[in-house]
Amino acid sequence: VGKIGPIELTRDKIDILKVVAPEETVVAVAPEPATPAPQPPATQDWQAIFNGKDLKGWRKWGPGQVQVSQGSIIMDGECGLTYEKMPKVKDVIISAEIKLIKPGITKLALRESGQGLYHVEFSGDNGTVARWDNAAKKNVVLKRFKFAPTADNIYRMQFGALDRTLLAYVNGRKVADIELPDDKDLLGPGSVNVSIWQATSAFRKIEIKVLK
């Protein structure tokens, strides 16, 4: 994998995502205004878990490259980062601004338990909410949705778990709302992580919020 140079993250207009087959969830995102309205500061309910300067509190895994540049985590190849100071709660949402620089698989994950790790991933024109099955060593797909990102845009991704429900959002629009079976081993407290597979992605403004 070649060396990754500094990548400037700018906020451009968000594309309108195309309409797809009716059985799939469609994300329709309005373009950003020419002059974005000022955003309120994060409330005390949100906790920043990336300080924008270094990887303090994070553990890297996998052979890919990771660097911090201009307030963002740049990941290239095949690797991930696990936040090691995660509070021991199971009802939580993780939020991050993500720039998908090179095609591949980019993931937000939470709630690692005996059954595996729940995650939302973005690959090509598709999005998937799935669980990694530890025993079978494969993804168990729970929901697919259409997602048409471009390399020049930044997307706000959010993935959360509340009681037995998994929730996923892209730019504030809900793309998944999944009720899970009543199996106590399915939803246990665990960590959150970000990862990529054969991709280059940038992550910034990574936050978590305990839901209850």
Image: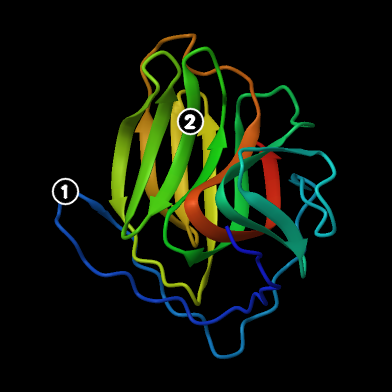
In the figure, 90 relative to 95: above or below?
above
Does the residue at mark 2 contact the one at mark 1 (Cβ under 8 Å)?
Answer: no
Residue at the extreme bottom of the image, as rendered? 34
Foreground residue, 120 or 139? 139
Which of the 4 image quarters holds residue 84?
Answer: top right
Q: Is residue 211 visible?
A: no
Mark 2 surroundings: few (<14), some (14-19) or many (≥20) residues within 10 A: many
Label 1 sits on residue: 23
Q: The disc labelled 1 sits on which kind of residue? A: Glu
Which of the 4 image quarters holds residue 124?
Answer: bottom left
In the figure, 206 relative to 133: above or below?
below
Residue at the extreme front of the image, as rendered? 2
Instruction: Identify the image quadrant of the C terminus.
Output: top right
Label 2 sits on residue: 118
Q: Earlier in the sequence, mark 2 or mark 1?
A: 1
State the CA–CA distance, disc 2 to disc 1: 22 Å
Q: Is residue 143 visible?
A: yes
Percent across and percent down for residue 188 are 57, 17
The residue tagged with tag 2: helix, strand or loop?
strand
Which residue does the image show at 68% across and 24% down from the upper left? 89
Side of 178 where 71 appears, left or right = right
Foreground residue, 170 or 107? 107
The residue tagged with tag 1: helix, strand or loop?
loop
Percent across and percent down for residue 163 are 51, 24
Q: The disc labelled 2 sits on which kind of residue? A: Tyr
